[in-house]
Amino acid sequence: MPNTEYRSKVRIRGIWQRHDWEHCIRDDLDYQKHVDYVHVNPLKQGHIERVTDWPYSTFHRYVVKGIYPANWYGDINAAIDGDD
């Protein structure tokens, strides 16, 4: 960003949102929950209707390896009705 542009205190801080924080992965279950979150997030944000629709996701590699079924997490209604 050019130095001539007005920057609020939030913009000076950088690109990260104010509520972001560092988190150390505690164990395998914690890691799995974070991976699940990353795979489901584009669905919850309304960018896609099914997790498999997001072309940039590592989810596709997990399906090939047999870690997830291709229809994992269902569709947008499951994300809205499901728990976080």
Image (tube, grey):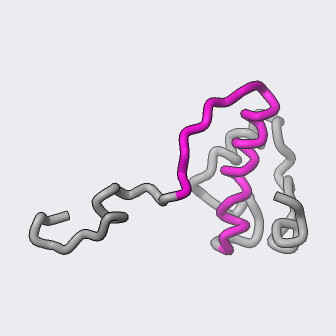
In x, y percent, where is residue 25? 67, 30
In x, y percent, where is residue 65? 76, 33
- Residue 76 falls left or right of residue 35: right
Say whether residue 26 is magenta: yes
- Residue 80 falls left or right of residue 39: right
In x, y percent, where is residue 53? 69, 64
Q: Nearer the viewer, residue 72 or 41?
A: 41
Q: Residue furthest left?
A: 4
Q: Nearer the viewer, residue 35 or 67?
A: 35
Image quarter of the C terminus: bottom right
Identity of the residue drawn at 65% across and 63% down: 42
Q: Main secondary structure of the magenta part?
A: helix
Say whether residue 22 is magenta: yes
Q: Residue furthest front?
A: 9
Above-or-below relation of 70 to 62: below
Using the rendered view, name the quadrant where residue 47 is placed. bottom right
Image quarter of the N terminus: bottom left
Identity of the residue drawn at 75% across and 47% down: 36
Identity of the residue drawn at 62% across and 51% down: 57
- Residue 40 falls left or right of residue 66: left
- Residue 79 falls left or right of residue 8: right
Q: Nearer the viewer, residue 75 or 14?
A: 14
Q: Residue furthest top?
A: 27
In x, y percent, where is residue 31? 72, 33
Magenta span of residues? 19-46
Number of callouts: 0
Identity of the residue drawn at 86% across and 74% down: 77
